[in-house]
Image (cartoon, rainbow, N blue to C red):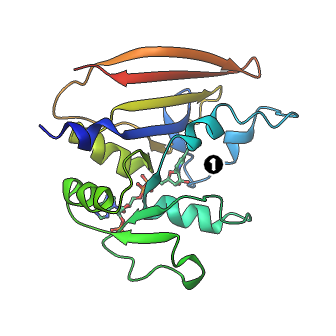
């Protein structure tokens, strides 16, 4: 069916052992709870180099612009939102507001020439999974139980099988599983 549409949608995200992507206060400081003196990027740069653009939920976008860092992406970021009216002026040309069904959104992004997409944000990833639109997932597990917060996964209309392609261990503490959708 829409093979091109789903083949190029990738997730690269870190969770707690209990599967949360943000703590009860929306915080993500725990992502850095393992000392990383050599600043190991845990495969992020290699992953990022392979993508053409990002599709991000409004809440993740707001988290990123709220961080005390320069804009971290040198590829186009497509922000999904029904409520955001406009993109802050300093992000014009780099960030593009999108809404509609996921298929409509993906078609629009593909028409602009961007195919390999990094899908980010809990709700956004769950919405993509509900429509079986994710092909690859790199899931990094931080050894902490948060006990509550925003879960990465939720119920799905159907089970989705994935194949484990590779497992890596970083800093002797952090596991990373790379899964590919098995059809
Ligand atoms: N652990 C990690 O590595 C990691 C990575 C990324 C994010 N996070 C954290 O996860 C949290 C964000 O996740 P989240 O689940 O709250 O949400 P999210 O996916 O970032 O954003 C959800 C919002 O995206 C918009 N949206 C999603 N699908 C849409 C569609 N088809 N059309 C229009 N708008 C759409 C809606 O915005 P409107 O309400 O404006 O309509 C929705 O409220 C943040 O705390 C962030 O820091 C953690």
Residue at 39% in and 54% down: 114
Q: Secondary structure at mark 1?
A: loop
Task: Give coordinates of residue 108: x percent, y percent.
Answer: 27, 62
Q: What residue is at 21 percent from the left and 24 percent from the top? A: 159
Q: Is residue 107 above or below residue 116?
A: below
**Residue 130, image x, y percentages:** 23, 40
Q: Residue 133's image quarter?
A: top left
The quadrant of the image that shows the C terminus is top left
Residue 72 falls left or right of residue 101:
right
Pointer 1 residue Cβ closer than 8 Å to ligand 1: yes
Q: Quadrant of ligand 1?
A: bottom left
Residue that badge 1 annotates:
28
Residue 40 coordinates in the image, percent (x, y): 77, 33
The answer to whether residue 165 is above or below residue 44 is: above
Seen in the picture, residue 7 relative to 102 is either above or below; the reply is above
- Relative to 109, say whether 7 is above or below: above
- Classify residue 143 by image quadrant: top right
């Amino acid at each position: 069916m829409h093979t091109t549409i789903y083949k190029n949608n990738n997730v690269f995200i870190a969770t707690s052992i209990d599967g949360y992507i943000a703590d009860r206060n929306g915080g993500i400081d725990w992502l850095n709870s393992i000392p990383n003196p050599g600043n190991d990027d845990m495969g992020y740069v290699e992953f990022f180099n392979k993508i053409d653009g990002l599709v991000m939920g409004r809440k993740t976008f707001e988290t990123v612009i709220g961080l005390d860092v320069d804009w971290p992406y040198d590829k186009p970021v497509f922000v999904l939102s029904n409520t955001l009216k406009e993109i802050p002026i300093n992000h014009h040309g780099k960030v593009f507001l999108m809404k509609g069904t996921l298929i409509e959104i993906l078609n629009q992004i593909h028409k602009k020439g961007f195919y390999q997409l990094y899908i980010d944000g809990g709700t956004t990833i769950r919405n993509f999974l509900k429509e079986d639109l994710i092909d690859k997932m790199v899931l990094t597990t931080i050894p902490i139980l948060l006990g509550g917060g925003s879960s990465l996964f939720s119920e799905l209309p159907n089970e989705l099988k994935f194949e484990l392609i590779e497992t890596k261990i970083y800093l002797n503490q952090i596991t990373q599983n790379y899964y590919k959708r098995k059809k």
